[in-house]
Image: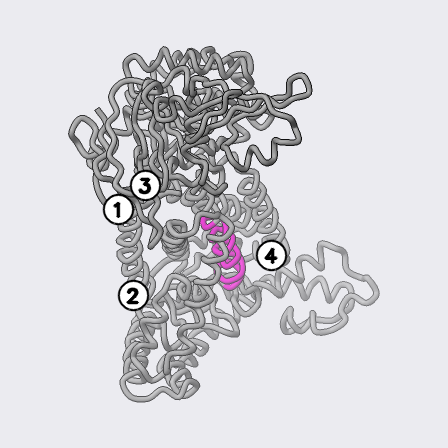
């Protein structure tokens, strides 16, 4: 067996790692089922998209209207038969205590609900241009500027970025990127659930695991007091290089396992059939808090892959940070606590930087700040981080810095006295 | 040939070794010294775990630091504090160390089997080491040090935890191995090296005090080691005047072996000094410090 395989074996046979992975996956399954209570309603969109496609245009709206009216007519036929009443909309029916005497069968109620849901989609689609016009990107930027009382070059930088986003928004309006059917954000909050709630847990769970794995691997010989034997073998100090590669490999594997299983379950519970290629900036996605306007013209599936790619990149950066810490601290649990302290320090540093100093921008370009903004990656995310290439720049800069430091640590370890 | 050239090692302001000059050719070298003398520091320098502050260590004329893996390839080392993985069997552990030592894969299984037989662990080769006694663990340590058939074998306290039978077997094994390699053996147990070491290196006050054969080293106190029979009542005052080497009770009296550099009493019998006598004599003033 090769040296790297022996190192991998150390991780995969660790009861702590196996236990944590199992706990995290179980927790994610609970979160998924708890957060997708409207599963039956969500499926209705798949049916609508099957019939009319997801692109909202005049032709589609004519067909959608006819279908909706037809369904409403059927609803009224049922209600008239049972109560001699008719309704202008399904919402009107639901606003009354329509089933007080249990006069409707289960199938009738399910049908009423179906009509109510398609009615929602129909009216949101109908008013889509009005809702879109209400969004003013420059005003969002100005709101942030006045909230932080930004002045001078900092305020100008922010204005410039929001002006760029505004251009992108105008383009989006021109090409109709926002006019696509998707789960209604204000009703179901599926974007927020997937990218804010679920992925937030996934990112932190994987971060805990990769930090523990890297610390565990790097401290393994010292904690078992085998370092005198191991580092006097032919492979010697070069073992640290193997450990670095194995830490990255196992971290990628753990990321794949956690994300793979969790998303596998999520997408089997919530059907995205017919919706994979819907642009992520669809205004259907927008919820009460945020307009998810993406800097790039990306479909949902493309955004998802870019998002996952960014998670991998962040986790690799965390491996590098832990690797550097472990060159100074030879205890896996101490490594974890030092990492947590560094995380805390990096997060609070921006609060000590004067907001009108240009230094306020670079202090937000850290992997820790990056994961805090994960729900809105590649989108508008506040005055200090709304840059088109914020994510890419942060990763690129930190990859260079951390890989250089890791290289220095590997070289330094070769000449380090071992006691 | 392994040459230690003017090597000093400092940890901050603390000097652990001063101007060490040694030469090792094939044979067994016993490294003697009390705790804190610098034996382990010297061994760690020879195994590249530590790097000299001054001086250099050469193997066949090349600096061992520059030789890097080419040096460690011919090195076998059993540390004083031998760590192991509790959930590994000795076989798994030796296979792992074989991989680190770069042994050819097709030879590993046979070599591991050979060594487990040699150290008498073949019947428990697949048992987890968490259940092993100290002696069994030490035997795994000896086996791992010999995996790569090293040209330089460095053993720090190798007989700790071994029972007398295992100790004899170990001594014979080292004597056999030393024909074509350098064996450096550090121990507190003088009897372990007395019968097998070609040369003794004695370290005192961070410096090499003697490096010679046992016979020549024993000559240091030749004619000054005596035995006499005294009453128990006189033992206390006797010890105040002479360095007691060993004592035993016989016929209600105390037979005491001691060193005297001055007057000789008629009741004293001159005896031949052994290495343990020299050890006790040389280090008589050393405090009982902890090994650094």
Q: Which residue is mark 3?
A: B50
CB-based contact (under 8 Å), mark 2 and mark 3: no
Q: Which residue is mark 1?
A: B53
Q: Answer whether residue A198 is magenta in the image.
A: yes
Quarter holding residue B66: top left
Is A370 rendered above or below residue B56?
below
How far across and down, in percent of the image, does residue A117 sit?
A: 59, 63
Q: Is residue B15 left or right of residue A42?
A: left
Q: Residue furthest right?
A: A101
Marks 2 and 3, how far apart at CA: 47 Å
Residue visible at 26% across and 25% down?
Answer: B24
Q: Is residue A274 left or right of residue A93?
A: left
Q: Which residue is mark 4?
A: A36
Judge if badges 3 and 1 mark residues of a common chain. Answer: yes
Residue visible at 24% across and 21% down?
Answer: B25
Earlier-in-chain disc, 4 versus 2: 4
Between residues B80 and A133, which one lies in front from this camera angle?
B80
Where disc 3 sits, the SS reads: loop
The range drawn in magenta is A192-211
Residue B174 in view of the camera: yes
Q: Residues within 10 Å of mark 2 (few under 14, many from 20)?
A: few
Foreground mark, 3 or 1?
Answer: 1
Q: Which residue is mark 2?
A: A389
Where disc 2 sits, the SS reads: loop
How far across and down, in percent of the image, does residue B168 sit?
A: 48, 13
Marks 1 and 4, how far apart at CA: 65 Å
Q: Answer whether residue B192 is magenta in the image.
A: no
Q: Is residue B113 left or right of residue B210?
A: right
Identify the subunit bearing mark 4.
A
Judge if badges 2 and 3 mark residues of a common chain. Answer: no
């Amino acid at each position: 067996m090769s040296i790297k395989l022996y190192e991998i074996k150390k991780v995969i046979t660790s009861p702590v790692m196996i236990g944590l992975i199992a706990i995290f996956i179980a927790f994610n399954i609970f979160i998924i089922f708890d957060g997708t209570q409207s599963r039956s309603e969500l499926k209705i969109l798949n049916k609508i998209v099957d019939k009319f496609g997801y692109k909202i245009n005049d032709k589609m709206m004519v067909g959608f209207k006819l279908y909706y009216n037809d369904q409403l007519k059927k609803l009224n036929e049922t209600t008239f038969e049972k109560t001699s009443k008719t309704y202008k909309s399904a919402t009107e029916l639901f606003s009354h205590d329509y089933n007080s005497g249990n006069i409707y069968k289960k199938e009738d109620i399910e049908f009423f609900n179906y009509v109510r849901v398609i009615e929602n989609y129909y009216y949101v689609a109908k008013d889509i241009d009005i809702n879109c016009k209400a969004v003013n990107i420059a005003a969002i930027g100005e709101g942030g500027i006045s909230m932080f009382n930004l002045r001078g070059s900092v305020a100008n930088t922010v204005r410039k970025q929001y002006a760029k986003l505004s251009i992108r928004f105008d383009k989006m309006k021109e090409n109709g990127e926002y006019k696509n059917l998707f789960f209604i954000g204000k009703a179901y909050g599926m974007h927020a659930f997937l990218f804010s709630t679920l992925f937030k847990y996934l990112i932190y769970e994987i971060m805990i695991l990769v930090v523990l794995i890297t610390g565990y691997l790097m401290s393994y010989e010292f904690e078992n007091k085998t370092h005198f034997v191991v580092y006097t073998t032919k492979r010697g100090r070069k073992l640290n290089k193997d450990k670095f590669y194995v830490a990255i490999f196992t971290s990628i594997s753990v990321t794949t396992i956690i994300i793979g299983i969790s998303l596998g379950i999520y997408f089997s519970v919530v059907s995205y059939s017919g919706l994979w290629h819907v642009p992520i900036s669809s205004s259907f996605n927008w919820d009460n808090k945020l307009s998810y306007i993406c800097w790039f013209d990306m479909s949902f599936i493309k955004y998802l892959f870019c998002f996952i790619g960014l998670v991998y990149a962040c986790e690799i950066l965390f491996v590098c940070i832990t690797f550097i810490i472990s060159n100074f601290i030879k205890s896996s649990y101490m490594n974890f606590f030092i990492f947590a302290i560094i995380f805390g320090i990096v997060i609070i540093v921006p609060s000590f930087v004067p907001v009108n100093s240009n230094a306020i921008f670079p202090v937000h370009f850290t992997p820790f700040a990056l994961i805090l903004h994960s729900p809105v990656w590649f989108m508008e995310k506040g005055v200090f981080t709304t840059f088109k290439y914020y994510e890419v720049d942060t990763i690129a800069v930190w990859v260079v810095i951390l890989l250089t430091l890791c290289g220095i640590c590997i070289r330094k370890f070769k000449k380090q006295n071992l006691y | 040939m392994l040459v230690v050239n003017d090597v000093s090692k400092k940890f901050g302001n603390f000097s652990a070794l001063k101007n060490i000059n040694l030469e090792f050719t094939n044979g067994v070298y016993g490294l003697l010294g009390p705790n804190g003398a610098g034996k382990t520091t010297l061994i760690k320098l020879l195994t590249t775990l530590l790097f000299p502050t001054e001086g250099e260590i050469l193997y066949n004329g090349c600096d061992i630091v520059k030789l890097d893996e080419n040096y460690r390839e011919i090195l076998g080392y059993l540390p004083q504090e031998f760590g192991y993985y509790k959930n590994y069997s000795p076989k798994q552990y030796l296979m792992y160390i074989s991989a680190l030592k770069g042994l050819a894969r097709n030879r590993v299984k046979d070599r591991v089997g050979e060594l487990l037989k040699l150290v008498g662990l073949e019947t428990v080769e697949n048992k987890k080491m968490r259940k092993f006694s100290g002696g069994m663990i030490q035997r795994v340590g000896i086996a791992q040090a010999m995996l790569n058939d090293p040209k330089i074998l460095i053993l720090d306290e190798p007989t700790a935890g071994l029972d007398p039978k295992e100790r004899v077997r170990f001594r014979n094994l080292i004597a056999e191995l030393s024909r074509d390699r350098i064996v450096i053996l550090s121990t507190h147990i003088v009897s372990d090296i007395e019968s097998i070491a070609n040369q003794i290196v004695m370290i005192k006050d961070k410096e090499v005090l003697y490096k010679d054969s046992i016979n020549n080293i024993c000559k240091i106190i030749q004619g000054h080691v005596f035995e006499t029979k005294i009453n128990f009542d006189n033992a206390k005052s006797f010890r105040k005047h002479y360095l007691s080497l060993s004592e035993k009770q016989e016929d209600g009296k105390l037979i005491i072996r001691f060193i005297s550099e001055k007057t000789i009493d008629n009741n004293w019998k001159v005896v031949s000094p052994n290495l343990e006598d020299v050890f006790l004599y040389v280090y008589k003033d050393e405090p009982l410090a902890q090994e650094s």
